[in-house]
Image (cartoon, rainbow, N blue to C red):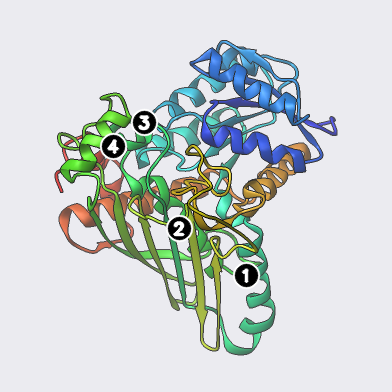
Amino acid sequence: MSSERLGIGIVGSGFVAKFHIQSLVSVRDADLAAITSPTRAHAEEAAQLARSLSVGSPQVHSSVAEMVRDPAVDAIWICSPNDTRLAVVEEIVDAIERGAEIAGVACEKPLARNVAEAKRMLDLAARVKLLHGYLENQIFAPSLVRGKEIIWKRAVPIAGRPYLARAAEEHSGPHTPWFWSGVRQGGGVLNDMLCHSYEAGRFLLTAPDEPRDALTVTKVSAQIASLKWTRKEYSEALREQTQGLIDYARAPAEDFAHATVRLETAEGVPVMVEATTSWTFVGAGLRLRMELLGPEYSMQVDTLNSELQVFLSRRVTGSEGEDLVEKQNAEQGLMPVVPDEAATYGYVAENRHMVRAFLAGREPDETWADGLAVTEVLMACYLSAEQERVVRFPAPELEHFVPAVAQGTWQP
């Protein structure tokens, strides 16, 4: 591209789209140029947020194709629900083949609901030679990046490469109904959040000078369960909360998942990722924990060990909100505060990287090939949980596998 600034068009106007908009305050060479969403009022609200933050004056478009044809739009960020993403890419590619021009497209995690969808998205991007980035914010989180840098620079040359990465993400449940839907989302908490945890673990175990695919998956083992939200009290509360759209007494999705993934280095040395996710955590709010262990060293990250805490007595009352931490569960007591969530969770560095890659005309470090690799592991996790066995790689059976949770037929 000849331009020194990237005009971004966002598909979607929900929770994660707003995180991306907020992050652009710290991205100096991009503006939000356009936005489209099925609900125009929501798109207008997101556009107003961008204007209030001085990160652009976005045009609200009525369709994806219309936005791709907008000359102010250089790249697309896909932040729409999981069940729409393949159709969005098809519409983008169709517009390009009809003469529209954009530099690249970035897609939120997980890339797709299953392996077949993910491969189709990669094929479409290749058909029009479109640069593509996989928006996995956690591998851009400053604490994770800095911790990895220190370990690989100071400890690994003396003691040897790390052998175990642990990652966990927990909160009390999603914001919007479609996240709770196994059919729309492609699963439950495993698909929603273990995609983060596995990729964070793989990132930590991969040397800075190695390609993303340097480690080869050999075995996957996983368990899923519904521990909280199928209990009668909570399934009824969830049905009421979603105006009847979600009924876990009839069609539940898992709210807990645990997986172990064995990988090997190019030299055949085994390493492990252990990942745990849940929608059952009752605490201050979203909790992200990562660990890296090696022969003579370790590192830990915990986002709720914040440098800022506040205490509010029971006399300080207020309405529910998330002004202190994402997925906040209380408004009183001793509360950790994440001062800049967009930076802490990696959105700022992620978008800075994607913008600079697209401006330079090159693939980002994290592409849809990585998104496909993550999707393959997620599907292996579901298959392992359903059949109560270890899934060994290569696993051709994953090509057309759709989890029972995603079919709406799973029963815990």
Depth check: give the residue in front, 246 or 391.
246
Residue assigned mark 2: 197
Which sits earlier in the primary sequence, circle 4 or circle 1?
1
Mark in the foreground, 2 or 3: 3
Amino acid type indicated by mark 2: Ser
| Image spot of residue 129 (x, y percent) | 62, 32
Disc 2 crowd rating (10 Å Cα; few below 14, some 14-19, many 20+) is many
Q: Secondary structure at mark 4?
A: helix
The residue under the point 28% across, 37% down is 182
**Residue type highlighted by circle 1:** Lys
Per the model, the C-alpha gap separating discs 3 and 1 is 34 Å
Q: Position of residue 150 (x, y in %)?
A: 68, 75
Q: Secondary structure at mark 2?
A: helix
Q: Say the numbered circle drawn on residue 148.
A: 1
Would you say the residues marked 2 and 4 are in contact, meaning their CB atoms lie under 8 Å apart?
no
Q: CA distance from mark 4 to mark 1?
A: 34 Å
* Residue receiving disc 4: 182
Q: Residues within 10 Å of mark 4 (few under 14, many from 20)?
A: many
Quarter holding the N terminus is top right
Q: Amino acid at mark 4?
A: Gly
* Residue 106 relative to residue 377: left or right: right
Choose mark 3 or mark 1, whichever is in front: 3
Work out whether residue 179 or residue 268 is closer to the camera in this orientation and state it.
179
> Badge 1 local density, few (<14 within 10 Å), some, or many (20+)?
some
Say which element carries label 3.
helix
**Residue 178 marker:** 3
Residues at discs 4 and 1 in contact (Cβ within 8 Å)? no
Residue visible at 66% across and 59% down in the picture: 142
